[in-house]
Image (spheres, coloured by chain):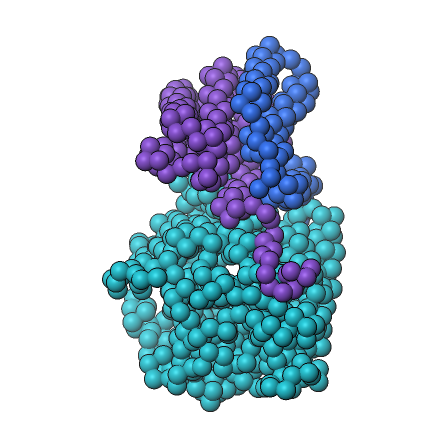
Chain colours: A cyan, B blue, C purple
């Protein structure tokens, strides 16, 4: 099919091709990951050496205070760090990039179900991120009410003046619409456009994770969108949905409603971010153990159970809010229940590894890294689920340690596993394994150093979101930990330079990649690296699942591709 | 796709019911019926009208039952979510610290 | 299933066109959005004291008329679909235009109603009822406006002969959206404006 030659703009900028859009999401996400990471380093510097000028970059960032973080800037740092990491770094990389790139290829389609909607979804993210950047430069600076945007701090312009706060909410709202559009495409494509023979039982786990994630987004993002519009109304239109008491223009608003609405979305959100990682790890452990994914069906059902449960546990973020205690108990029991399906698929991961012919490639290292850090993060979640324990550690660094192990560590390693694994397919070049291993090893060490320290200080009572622990007598013994965490964080940050260098250098000068460098069985690996513009010459025909590794009857190699006709008789799935 | 389509007469009949129910709703409010009766009636008529539109105009009655899952899940979820808000926001059974 | 195992048969989750599936997924998110707004209204109202009787503030007959207008537009929309399915091009165009005009009438009456009440002191910030009223009906009106724009696009496409008995999907999916907004109004009318 001949195309008239298209301009640079239509091919690489305003393209409806899912592969181009995925790369746009990836680059945007990596950029904001660096920005969010830099903010984390500023936060850790401030906590380690309160009010001291920051070396090198201090005078540039904080000219008015001689290079030190100011009390007004500190809340902006932790607010924007959280908001950027969740919505503008991880979501674009794991949902936007991984979702867009892998889904059409792995289901055997030429593109997403709605390519023009797909293009629009990226540009909405772009617009939202620009608005976010602008918010740093308006009078009053960026938002400072925490990424959770709690009312009445957020909903009152008396206490949170400045348009930077409104712009943050607006940027998020645009991002939310972008994510909803993307989710619509993912759900429709995965459910409706699968190639002949590709039944749901033969779907790669990565796509199951992306599907469940998209379902959660479709259901819960609109709830927080409603809440955020109400906050904007409270701020600028004189309403009082979430303002009560002396600040309220008239009676009737209720503050607790905001928290319910926010966490009604906010809890599913964390599962939205990690479900694709769980799926990806399930696939990677199989590919690099040369074994079928152990307990595939149980894993799919467990992830579904977690998806359902995740929508009815949000109150565990509100144990100390004054929420009705009996309702709190219900939330506690439901939260603990989530650990059961989680344990099931986790054990299935271990079952996949058991007696496998392990290949310690860089993606595999990061997948194994996820297994390790998620175990720690998940186990500490069990503690937090108990009302009695949570009342003690709520709003302390114990929680920060927990969610950074499950979010920052697991999700970050998952994002790297995605990039290292799919880079050859996306760009047709191979990344340096040596740099990759170094990147993994150093990141693993420093990451554990940073976040395990947080459990210690958290148990001691170190609060979240404070700028200077030394003002509290009882926290003075913890200051040495803050210094340790600060330097470990710097090490973590610097280790990521290895990744950036590897990424850029491999893009420009990497070895050419074959179609299937990992000997993986799913559909994407049956086409060239990078794939042709419309992915497949003819619609693929699928005869088995994506994890047919270690098939004993074969004389040439140990695995079957999903499109191998021999699989009709030889495969188990 | 072997699904049947309603005729224009069916559509007009449904429309008639919708208008009739609307007139009933406005009527009882303007006539000043007792509170409890108004609430019960209005909730019932609203649900009835919504179902008529969904089943006939949105074709759900003639689609395969599994299609009902698509609107069904968020409706059920929505109801559960709002009910969960009742103890705190409606009944104020909050913990006074 | 043998055919599936041999890779010859597709197995989509639902046996409906991709566009219809996509529109329903979109409507799922819309249902949840209005759940957030309407649900908040319900609990805020039930949890507050001194909520006024809507009929003492709102123009009940006018709102009733507006409801009839919107319900009529759902009828014309579904008649437009029927016309498309039967390849009756002129009827299709007529009904699409009529639906759009009824939608605009709804918006016009709404606008007149807003201005009138605002002048009498019932604003978005004058009471919690006011805040809920303008927020909910305001977002609903925005959805109606989007629907009108969509209908006008469909009308111009129909005028150029883009639709036929073999190709009426977009009419059907747009109809789903239009009927959904009608359902939202039916709910708002009963539990916000009347009760």
Task: Identify the residue shown where x is 72% and y is 65%.
Answer: A298
| Residue in the image at 65% along x and 48% along y | A322
Residue A567 to residue C79: above or below: below
Please tell me which residue lies in front, C43 or A33. A33
Q: Position of residue C29 (x, y in %)?
A: 53, 45
Which one is in front, A191 or A509? A191
The answer to whether A448 appears left or right of A422 in the picture is right
Q: Quadrant of residue B93?
A: top right
Examine the image and state in which quarter residue C80 appears.
Answer: top left
Residue C1 is situated, as x and y percent measured from the top left of the image, at: 69, 59
Q: Is residue A350 left or right of residue A403?
A: right
Q: Nearer the viewer, residue A384 or C22?
A: C22
Query: Is residue A163 depicted above or below A61 in this figure?
Result: above
Judged left or right of residue A283, residue A421 is: left
Query: In the image, what residue occupies the spot 38% across and 26% down?
Result: C90
In x, y percent, where is residue A419?
47, 74
The x, y position of residue A333, in whole percent, is 74, 56
Q: Residue furthest bottom?
A: A434
Q: Visible in this render: residue A278?
A: no
Q: Residue at x 60, y 58 (%)?
A: C9
Query: In the rendered image, which quarter contains the N terminus of chain A?
Result: bottom left
Q: Quadrant of the C terminus of chain A?
A: bottom right
């Amino acid at each position: 099919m001949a195309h008239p030659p298209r301009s640079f703009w239509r091919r690489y900028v305003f393209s409806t091709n899912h592969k181009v859009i995925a790369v746009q999401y990836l680059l945007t996400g990596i950029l904001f990951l660096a920005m969010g990471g830099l903010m984390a380093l500023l936060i850790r510097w401030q906590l380690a050496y309160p009010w001291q000028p920051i070396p090198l970059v201090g005078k540039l960032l904080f000219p008015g205070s001689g290079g030190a973080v100011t009390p007004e800037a500190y809340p902006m740092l932790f607010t924007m760090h959280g908001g950027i990491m969740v919505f503008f770094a991880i979501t674009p990389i794991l949902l936007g990039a991984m979702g867009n790139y892998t889904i059409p290829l792995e289901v055997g389609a030429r593109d997403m179900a709605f390519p023009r909607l797909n293009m629009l979804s990226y540009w909405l993210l772009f617009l939202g991120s620009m608005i976010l950047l602008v918010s740093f430069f308006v009078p009053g600076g960026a938002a400072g009410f925490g990424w959770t945007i709690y009312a009445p701090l957020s909903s009152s312009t008396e206490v949170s003046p400045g348009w930077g706060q409104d712009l943050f909410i607006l940027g998020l709202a645009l991002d939310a619409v972008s994510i909803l559009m993307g989710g619509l495409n993912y759900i429709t494509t995965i459910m409706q456009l699968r190639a002949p023979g590709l039944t749901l039982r033969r779907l790669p786990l990565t796509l199951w994770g992306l599907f469940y994630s998209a379902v959660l987004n479709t259901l819960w993002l609109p709830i927080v969108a409603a809440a955020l519009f109400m906050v904007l109304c409270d701020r600028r239109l004189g309403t009082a949905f979430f303002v009560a008491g002396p600040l309220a223009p008239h009676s009737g608003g209720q503050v607790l409603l905001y928290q319910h609405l926010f966490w009604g979305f906010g809890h599913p959100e964390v599962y939205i971010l990690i479900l694709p990682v769980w799926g990806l790890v399930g696939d990677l452990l199989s590919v690099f153990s040369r074994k079928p994914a152990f307990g595939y069906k149980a894993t799919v059902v467990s992830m579904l159970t977690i998806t359902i449960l995740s929508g009815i546990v949000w109150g565990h973020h509100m144990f100390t809010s004054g929420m009705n205690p009996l309702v709190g108990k219900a939330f506690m029991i439901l939260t603990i229940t989530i650990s059961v399906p989680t344990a099931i698929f986790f054990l299935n991961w271990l079952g996949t590894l058991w007696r496998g012919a392990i290949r310690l490639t860089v993606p595999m290292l990061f997948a194994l890294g996820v297994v390790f850090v998620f175990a720690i993060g998940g186990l500490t979640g069990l503690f937090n689920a108990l009302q009695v324990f949570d009342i003690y550690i709520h709003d302390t660094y114990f929680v920060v340690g927990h969610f950074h192990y499950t979010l920052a560590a697991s999700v970050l390693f998952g994002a790297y596993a995605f990039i290292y694994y799919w880079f050859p397919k996306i760009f047709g070049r191979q990344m340096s394994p040596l740099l990759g291993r170094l990147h993994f090893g150093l990141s693993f060490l420093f990451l554990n150093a940073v976040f395990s320290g947080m459990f210690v200080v958290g148990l001691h009572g170190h609060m979240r979101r404070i700028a200077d622990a030394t003002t509290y007598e009882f926290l003075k013994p913890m200051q040495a930990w803050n210094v340790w965490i600060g330097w470990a964080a710097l090490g973590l940050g610097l280790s990521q330079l290895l990744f950036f260098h590897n990424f850029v250098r491999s893009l420009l000068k990497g070895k050419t990649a074959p179609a299937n460098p990992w000997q993986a069985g799913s559909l994407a690996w049956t086409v060239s690296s990078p794939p042709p513009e419309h992915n497949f010459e003819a619609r693929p025909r699928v005869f088995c699942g994506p994890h047919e590794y270690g098939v004993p009857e074969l004389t040439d190699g140990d695995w079957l591709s999903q499109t191998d006709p021999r699989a009709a008789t030889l495969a188990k799935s | 796709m072997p699904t049947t389509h309603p005729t224009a007469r069916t559509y007009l009949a449904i429309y008639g019911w919708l208008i009739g129910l609307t007139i009933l709703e406005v009527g009882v409010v303007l006539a000043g019926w007792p509170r409890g009766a108004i609430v019960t009636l209005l909730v019932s008529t609203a649900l009835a009208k919504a179902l008529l539109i969904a089943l006939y105009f949105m074709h759900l009655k003639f689609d395969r039952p599994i299609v009902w899952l698509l609107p069904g899940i968020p409706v059920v979820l929505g109801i559960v979510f709002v009910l969960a808000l009742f103890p705190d926001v409606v009944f104020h059974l909050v913990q006074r610290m | 299933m043998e055919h599936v195992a041999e890779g010859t048969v597709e197995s989509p989750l639902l046996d409906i066109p991709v566009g219809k599936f996509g529109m329903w997924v979109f409507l799922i998110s819309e249902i949840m959005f209005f759940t957030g707004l309407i649900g908040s209204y319900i609990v805020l109202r039930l949890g507050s004291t001194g909520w006024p009787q809507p009929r003492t503030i709102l123009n009940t007959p006018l709102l009733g008329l507006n409801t009839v207008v919107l319900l009529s537009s759902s009828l014309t929309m579904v008649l437009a679909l029927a016309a498309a399915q039967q390849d009756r091009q002129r009827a299709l165009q007529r009904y699409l235009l009529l639906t759009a005009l009824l939608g605009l009438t709804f918006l016009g009456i709404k606008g007149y109603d807003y201005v009138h009440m605002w002048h009498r002191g019932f604003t978005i910030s004058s009471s919690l009822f006011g805040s809920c009223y303008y927020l909910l009906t305001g977002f609903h009106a925005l959805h109606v406006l989007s629907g009108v724009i969509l209908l006008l696009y469909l009308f111009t496409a129909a005028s150029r002969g883009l639709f036929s008995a073999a190709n009426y999907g977009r009419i059907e999916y747009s109809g789903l959206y239009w009927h959904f907004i009608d359902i939202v109004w039916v709910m708002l009318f009963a539990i916000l404006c009347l009760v």
